[in-house]
Image (spheres, helix red, strand yellow):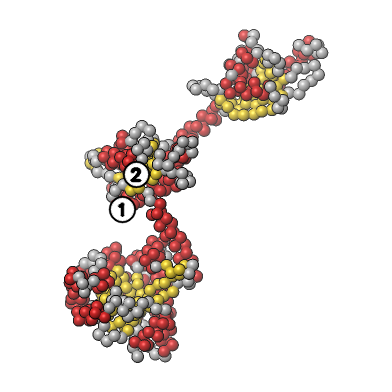
Amino acid sequence: MPAELSPQIWHVLESVRQRYLDALPIAAAIITISDDSFIDCANDQFRLLAEWDERLGERRIAQVPLLRSGPIGTRLSAFLKKDDPAFQFDTADGRAIGGRHFTVRFARLSMLPGQPIRCMVSLIDKTAQVETERSLRSEMLRDTLTGLPNRFAFNERVEAVMNEPGFSDQSHAVLAVDMTRFSRVNECMGAIAGDELLITFARRLVSALRPSDMLARISGDEFGVLLRLDRGLADAMRAAERIKAVLTLPFRLSELEIRVDCAIGCAILNKSVSSADEVLRNAQFALKNAKRTGTTQIYEPAQAQAVRRRFSIETELRVAIEAGQLELAYQPLTELSTGRVAGFEALARWELEGKPVPPSEFIPVAEESGLIVQLGRWALDTATQTLADWDLKTGTRLPISVNVNLSPVQISRDDVAAAVSGALSASGIDGDRLTLELTEGAIIQDPERVARALKALQRFDVKIAMDDFGSGYTSLASLQLLPIDILKIDQRFVSGMLQDGDSAAIVDAILSLARALGMETTAEGIESEALAAALLQKGCTYGQGFLYSEALPAADALAYWLERNA
């Protein structure tokens, strides 16, 4: 007790401090700082949390377990040796079982004359909050159906592996495993059977993996596996084989036995990959290839670059269509018996940054993205308007027809009859000067829809040509039922018919079929006079190829026609 204060005053101060602590809603104690610091006073909350009973007569902090050692005791000891006014931190009491979590604050108290140096220790018990957060986080990172980690937990683990100090290339791999036939089971047997299949499928996957491997459900019927590679890529391939092996036995659902297989894509972790999301995307890209090939596929960066290139082309193509940056070029269709030009095939041409983009590159992108509908309508409008412009320029109705290609996507997504009607009305040309070319693939995809679309075009007197005939799987019944006027013989048969007897036989068969059905024929890819003469002798109607001309701009195409048909 300091000599400067009387016992009465000292007692009053102690009473005030105690009432102040008792009024606080949190655990708090006042510590007197000395060579052997001790607890001056504390409230009941502090006594409970610190498991300290002052009635035992021990007030020294060295004898209070919570303040003597552990994270709180260590920080308190350091604080008492410094002159910092306050220090706050979150910590736990260090016990593995039944441990508690606190927000702890140390604060030095203002000194009155004659009083020793003191500080206040306050504890906010956050155990319930921390445990709730842990429980919520556990639920957030776990798939409720299978009990496996979900995509978030999987990505966290992959990120942790990539951030390990000893991480090296080729040390880990991610497998993306997709169950086949799941949607069919779900549709036919219901969601409960589908859930039962997912649970059983997950159990079989677990049985095929090592204890160190991580399995997660990353989407509906897709699972992710994180593998440590002790022997390089061979470990990943062996894991894929084990997974395939455990799926050989059928799954029993209710009274049915169903066989389910899977497709597997693999991506190797390396330092060039920036995130777990990217690793998983790479594995899923390989998975897409695995579904197509039926075998486990390893991610190849070049394939992903090609996909990114397609997306880039899609963006640029959309801009080009809206800005009118595409052009049509016209390749002559020559009547083999007379050498006169009967018409032209309109072909889309596009330059990007001064370099031509091949139609074989941008047309599939247009079909995949749906831009082919806009592109197809633009081609119809432009080709028919070009014919009208040629008539106007020459002052007469020219005996020229124009062929425009029709995509299977256009037939499935667009009203082709309305598009043709609009193009003919806007240009003012007659329908018998327009020929629409469609491939065998368009007929195979949806023959009924194609039949309806083509029959709707008959009222415009538009001709229909089947492009690349012989390269697909069109049935003879389709030729009989559909209003086809012209068969275009695929250039693979035409170019080799003089050297290859099989090609010549196929060309003969197509020509005979066309004659029997009353159709005209066009041979594609003619590059020599000998080939043209042979086709004429066989009875082919028209020829198309570099022997006559490449595809020409509109003005040059008209000049070519005037010269050849003078």
Q: Quadrant of the C terminus?
A: bottom left
Residue 359 marker: none
**113 relative position to 169: left or right:** right
What residue is at 40 percent from the left and 57 percent from the top? 306
What residue is at 60 percent from the left and 17 percent from the top? 68
Could you tell me how far apart the alpha carbons at marks 2 and 1 are, in whole angstroms?
14 Å
In which quarter of the view is residue 368 placed?
bottom left
Residue 31 higher or lower than 405, as above or below: above
Q: Quadrant of the N terminus?
A: top right
Question: Crowding near pointer 2: few (<14 within 10 Å), some, many (20+)?
Answer: many
Identify the element where label 2 is drawn. Answer: strand
In which quarter of the view is residue 55 placed?
top right
Residue 217 higher or lower than 494, as above or below: above
Residue 136 higher or lower than 499, as above or below: above
Tell me which amino acid carries mark 2.
Answer: Val
Q: Are marks 2 and 1 in contact (CB under 8 Å)?
A: no
**449 relative position to 390: left or right:** left
Tell me which amino acid carries mark 1.
Answer: Arg
In this rendered view, identify the residue nearer to me: 531 or 44: 531
Q: Is residue 133 visible?
A: yes
- List x then y, in percent, for residue 343: 33, 81
- List x then y, in percent, for residue 123: 62, 24
What residue is at 36 percent from the left and 88 percent from the top? 563
Identify the element where label 1 is drawn. Answer: helix
Question: Label 2: which residue?
Answer: 177
Instruction: Name the N-terminal-most of marks 2 and 1.
Output: 2
What residue is at 36 percent from the left and 40 percent from the top? 232
Question: Label 1: which residue?
Answer: 292
In which quarter of the view is residue 549 placed?
bottom left
Q: Is residue 463 visible?
A: no
